[in-house]
């Protein structure tokens, strides 16, 4: 090598490159314009010869280090376009110089990432097949601030970590590099050298695809854009943010369906408004399941390529069906190939060992104090909402985020600066999430699965609350399922489990759920219920119907394989819910619900009204959870008028006995349930009947004497558990906004 080149070379840096300890290789190896020409360098381990190719000219490179470090000083006053010709084992190949290309992350983007507000970080971090200065390749970027060195290894460089050490951005600790020739379909990982000299092999946290599990390498994907056909739906879905529209959700998993069309047709047939998909991200093993997310930005290969998921969502949207994604920002599995101690330090997880592990699942809890970790999660939310057009996110296990003492005994947790158990950093993260999604993704709804007593979780951030749209009402589910599990004869003693929910129904905006986690599919649900097969099915119909007429959004998971009678029942149930405003418009208002009779526990009967501002939209609901029908059951009604049965769970076409009311009935001026007017109905065993209420002007009826029904001594009040008494004793919360 010429002495002039020698003078310009960074020998300490070169030594660091050779020994795998240089974190900023561009500072050492990038082409450099000097007074004596252009200095070109390259590290080609085990190469016998190297040349610089400029057009048709060849410039030999001198080997300055036996490890394979080459350099050449070529003539010129500007850096030309060039390639390397490298001879190894007698075979010569040509390649571009990775260190001649500029970084793709701007200073503004890096600052936003450090501040936790780079909401589209996935556009630059990860692997992105692209073209720079006419050269095709892939731009890689990964956050590993405590690593000694990070190299990209893959099919494109024989998995040799010496060939493509990445360049560290000093402000953020992001390592980035454009690798010419790395193409879609190539496998890759990050080789991370940590303090102490150990080397880790990590899957890309921002990678869009992995190889088929249990293999763990990431895969470069094709950047081709998807052609969406759901613009009308995307504009119209904002109506669901009002929380006055019907929301009936079918819960399912991608693994249950072979094609997008199959699921789309099924949901359309059963008339749901939304589908909730269990996590679609890649997971390693069936034991952890879909909630054991391994790669947050990658669609599971078990379902196929990402475009297949987009096609499913596109088809559902064209059918008028929204799609909600189960999302897991609370914790992540302990996989050495993934986020666990990513750069040799607790980077993504809580740095406090005593608080880092989820006390129930044994997974890692996120470090919400880190702006970069928060950015990883926020960007992931935007990725699924914007790139895949999901209409909302259901956040799993929010309790473990909100409470420092979640699942822990006294002495096993550390209080916050105020001496209380709130995880202040997690609370601020959730507020940030809900507020920025509301601002930037119109119509997207956010649902919290939270079993605790966090106050006003669904009130707005502007009111200094967390700002979710809905909260999972597991308390209602547990009480209702416990009630249903009792023999009908014994249900009178736990009648309060049906009525308790109305003491807190307006404290939050709730989603009622009879889903996979609660009762399972129809077959699994039947195992929880008393009686013979016909009675079990009758109770399932009654349970679904009671949920549908109770205030709150709805979610169920009856399963894929349904008898035609039950499929027809669910379709009609959803149709009733979607077409009658009284069942949704005033869900968040005390005035939208009115008891007629809640204490007929000996009969196992509940009677109530669902209302809007318009009396003619009122619905009368009678629920009978006894195993016997009532053929002449008198019910007090709100006004003089016509009462027509619009739905009955006992119709023969649903598999019932046919105890129905085929004709509309006019109320009589006969007092019942402390009301002036009443009607007598047929009420099926283990069934629910719903009636429309049409006011009619009173004529002669107004002049008729009122017949008073002899009062019946109320039986002994049913026992209420201590927990229920405490709940009932709590002051009523203000109306949800």
Image (spheres, rainbow, N blue to C red):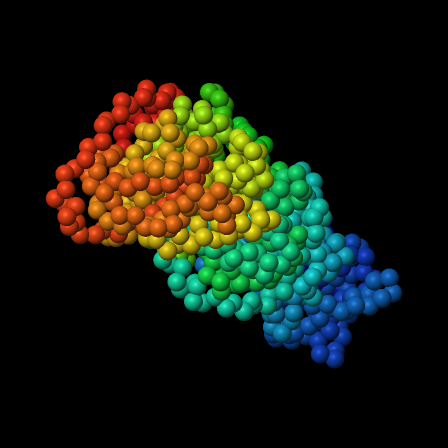
Residue at the spot 15% in from the left edge and 50% down from the top edge: 699
- Image quadrant occupied by the N terminus: bottom right
Residue occupying image coordinates x 65% and y 74%: 81
| Residue 388 falls left or right of residue 74 | left
Specify the farthest residue to the right.
Answer: 90
Q: What is the x, y in percent for residue 213?
A: 70, 48
> In this view, which residue lies farthest toward the bottom?
56
Residue located 68% across and 72% down the image: 82
Instruction: Depth check: give the residue in front, 532 or 609.
Output: 532
Q: Nearer the viewer, residue 675 or 27?
A: 675
Q: In the rendered view, tell whether residue 148 sits above or below residue 444.
A: above
Q: How many marks?
A: 0
Residue 79 rendering spot, x and y as whole percentages:
62, 72
Q: Nearer the viewer, residue 680 or 568?
A: 680
Residue 670 appears left or right of 85: left
In the rendered image, residue 234, in percent from the top left (x then y), is placed at 43, 63
Q: In the image, is 396 to the left or to the right of 675? A: right
Image quarter where the C terminus lies is: top left
Q: Residue at x 32, y 29 (%)?
A: 599
Q: Is residue 454 visible?
A: no
Looking at the image, which is closer to me, 330 or 202? 330
Q: Is residue 196 visible?
A: yes
Residue 331 percent across, percent down from the top left? 53, 39
In which quadrant of the rendered view does residue 596 lie? top left
The answer to whether residue 336 is left or right of residue 628 is right
């Amino acid at each position: 090598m010429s002495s002039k080149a020698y003078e310009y070379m960074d020998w300490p840096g070169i030594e660091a490159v050779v020994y795998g300890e240089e974190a900023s290789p561009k500072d050492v190896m990038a082409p450099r314009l000097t007074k004596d020409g252009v200095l070109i360098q390259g590290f080609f381990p085990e190469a016998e010869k190297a040349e610089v190719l400029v057009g048709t000219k060849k410039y030999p490179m001198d080997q300055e280090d036996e490890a394979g470090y080459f350099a050449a000083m070529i003539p010129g006053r500007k850096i030309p376009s060039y390639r390397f010709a490298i001879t190894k084992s007698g075979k010569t190949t040509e390649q571009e110089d990775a260190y001649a290309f500029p970084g793709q992350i701007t200073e503004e983007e890096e600052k936003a990432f450090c501040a936790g507000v780079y909401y589209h970080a996935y556009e630059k971090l990860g692997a992105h097949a692209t073209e720079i200065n006419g050269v095709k390749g892939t731009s890689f970027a990964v956050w590993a601030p405590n690593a000694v060195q990070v190299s990209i290894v893959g099919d494109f460089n024989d998995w040799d970590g010496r060939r493509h050490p990445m360049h560290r951005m000093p402000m953020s600790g992001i390592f980035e590099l454009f690798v010419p020739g790395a193409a879609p379909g190539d496998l890759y990982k990050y080789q991370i050298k940590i303090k102490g000299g150990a080397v880790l092999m990590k899957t890309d946290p921002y990678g869009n695809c992995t190889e088929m599990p249990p293999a763990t390498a990431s895969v470069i994907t094709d950047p081709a854009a998807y052609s969406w056909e759901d613009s009308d739906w995307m504009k119209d879905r904002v109506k669901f943010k009002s929380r006055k529209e019907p929301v009936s959700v079918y819960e399912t998993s991608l693994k249950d369906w072979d094609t997008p069309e199959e699921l789309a047709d099924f949901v359309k047939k059963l008339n749901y408004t939304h589908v909730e998909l269990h996590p679609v991200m890649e997971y390693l093993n069936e034991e952890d399941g879909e909630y054991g997310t391994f790669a947050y930005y990658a669609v599971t290969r078990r379902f196929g390529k990402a475009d297949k998921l987009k096609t499913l969502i596109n088809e559902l949207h064209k059918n008028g069906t929204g799609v909600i994604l189960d999302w897991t920002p609370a914790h992540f599995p302990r996989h050495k190939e993934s986020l666990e101690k990513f750069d040799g330090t607790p980077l993504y997880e809580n740095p406090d060992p005593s608080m880092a592990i989820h006390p129930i699942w044994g997974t890692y809890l996120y470090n919400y104090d880190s702006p970069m970790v928060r950015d990883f999660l926020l960007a992931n939310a935007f990725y699924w909402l914007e790139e895949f057009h999901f209409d909302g996110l259901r956040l799993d296990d929010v309790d473990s985020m909100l409470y420092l003492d979640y699942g822990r005994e006294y002495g096993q947790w550390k209080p916050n600066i105020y001496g209380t158990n709130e995880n202040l950093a997690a609370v601020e993260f959730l507020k940030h999430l809900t507020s920025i999604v509301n601002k930037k993704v119109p119509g997207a709804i956010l649902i919290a699965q939270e079993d605790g007593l966090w106050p006003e979780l669904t009130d707005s951030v502007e009111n200094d609350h967390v700002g979710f749209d809905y909260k999972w009402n597991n308390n209602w589910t547990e009480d209702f399922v416990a009630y249903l599990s009792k023999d009908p004869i014994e249900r009178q003693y736990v009648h309060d489990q049906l009525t308790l929910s109305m003491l807190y129904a307006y404290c939050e905006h709730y989603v009622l759920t009879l889903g996979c986690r609660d009762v399972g599919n129809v077959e699994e649900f039947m195992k929880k219920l008393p009686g013979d097969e016909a009675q079990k099915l009758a109770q399932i119909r009654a349970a679904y119907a009671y949920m549908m007429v109770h205030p709150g959004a709805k979610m169920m998971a009856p399963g894929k394989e349904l008898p035609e009678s039950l499929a027809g029942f669910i379709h009609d149930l959803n149709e009733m819910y979607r077409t009658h405003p009284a069942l949704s418009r005033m869900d968040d208002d005390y005035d939208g619900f009115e008891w007629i009779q809640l204490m007929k526990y000996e009969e196992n009967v509940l009677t109530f009204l669902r209302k809007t501002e318009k009396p003619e939209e009122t619905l009368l609901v009678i629920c009978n959870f006894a195993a016997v029908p009532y053929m002449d059951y008198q019910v007090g009604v709100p006004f003089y008028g016509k009462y027509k049965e619009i739905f009955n769970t006992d119709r023969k076409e649903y598999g019932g006995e046919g105890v129905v009311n085929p004709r509309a009935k006019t109320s009589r001026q006969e007092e019942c349930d402390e009301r002036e007017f009443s009607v007598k109905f047929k009420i099926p065993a283990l069934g629910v009947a719903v009636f429309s209420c049409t006011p009619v002007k009173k004529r002669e009826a107004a002049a008729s004497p009122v017949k008073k029904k002899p009062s019946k001594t109320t039986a002994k009040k049913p026992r209420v558990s201590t927990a229920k008494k405490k709940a009932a004793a709590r002051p009523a919360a203000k109306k949800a906004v």
